Image (cartoon, coloured by chain):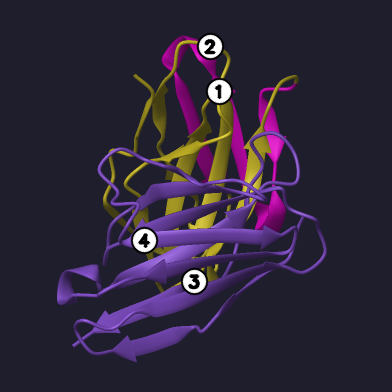
Amino acid sequence: GAVVSQHPSWVICKSGTSVKIECRSLDFQATTMFWYRQFPKQSLMLMATSNEGSKATYEQGVEKDKFLINHASLTLSTLTVTSAHPEDSSFYICSVSPSSYEQYFGPGTRLTVT
Amino acid sequence: AQSVTQPDIHITVSEGASLELRCNYSYGATPYLFWYVQSPGQGLQLLLKYFSGDTLVQGIKGFEAEFKRSQSSFNLRKPSVHWSDAAEYFCAVGARTDKLIFGTGTRLQVFP
């Protein structure tokens, strides 16, 4: 499988500020990465598909201007939550896909907006 | 539309007992099926996957799952549960665009 890291693992920010979350593929060049959101005791919901060198593809209902995704290299994708509000507090998880349909997940980032 | 159903929200078993977690899917083509495990505050770890071939697949940590097309099921089993197996388990189906659709999860609690 692939090894994926995320940074930070936990972040607290004030309402109205922006937060950047990094997702790194440590042993695999990932042309595609996925960003998920998970509310407490709930399942994972796909937010967007991050494509290296091109725009991300967002799922229906996800605000692209609020959740900015940049996939500038084959090993790094970033998710920026802009003008964060308490309702954005959640667990954000990224994944990489070394082959069709297989996904390997990062450890997640817990965002708390106060 | 594709969907995954995990009927059991919470299961409690005694250590050493056998385990079966249920998963039913709805998908128009041959599905790619997965089981993931998530410990509290952690990401997801792949337990096993089914793409084709033998319908009984072996995974890590002593888990196995059986694909039954006639029942649209992919149930996860383990003959003897260990306390360290306590976690959240997610079944997922792979969609055409490489996306994964997850079930709502089953929380496993293990009593000594």
- Specify the subunit that label 1 lies on: B
Gap in Å between the C-alphas at discs 1 and 4? 24 Å
- Viewer-side label of 2, 3: 3
Q: Position of residue A31 (x, y in %)?
A: 71, 48
Q: Residues within 10 Å of mark 1 (few under 14, many from 20)?
A: few
B6 to A111, vertically: above or below: above
Image location (x, y in percent) of residue A76: 67, 66
**Span of residues in magenta:** B54-77
* Type of amino acid under label 4: Phe
Disc 4 chain ID: A
Dot 2 or dot 1, earlier in sequence? 2
Kind of residue at badge 2: Ala
Assign a secondary structure to mark 1.
Answer: loop
Locate residue B91, reporting x and y percent.
46, 42
Mark 2 and mark 1: Cα distance apart in space: 9 Å
- Residue A67's tag is 4
**Mark 2 near mark 1, Cβ–Cβ under 8 Å?**
yes
Q: Nearer the viewer, residue A12 or B3?
A: A12
Helix, strand, or loop for circle 2?
loop
Disc 1 residue type (three-letter): Arg
The quadrant where residue B41 appears? bottom left
Say which mark, if any, is on residue B96.
1
Q: Quadrant of the N terminus of chain A?
A: bottom right
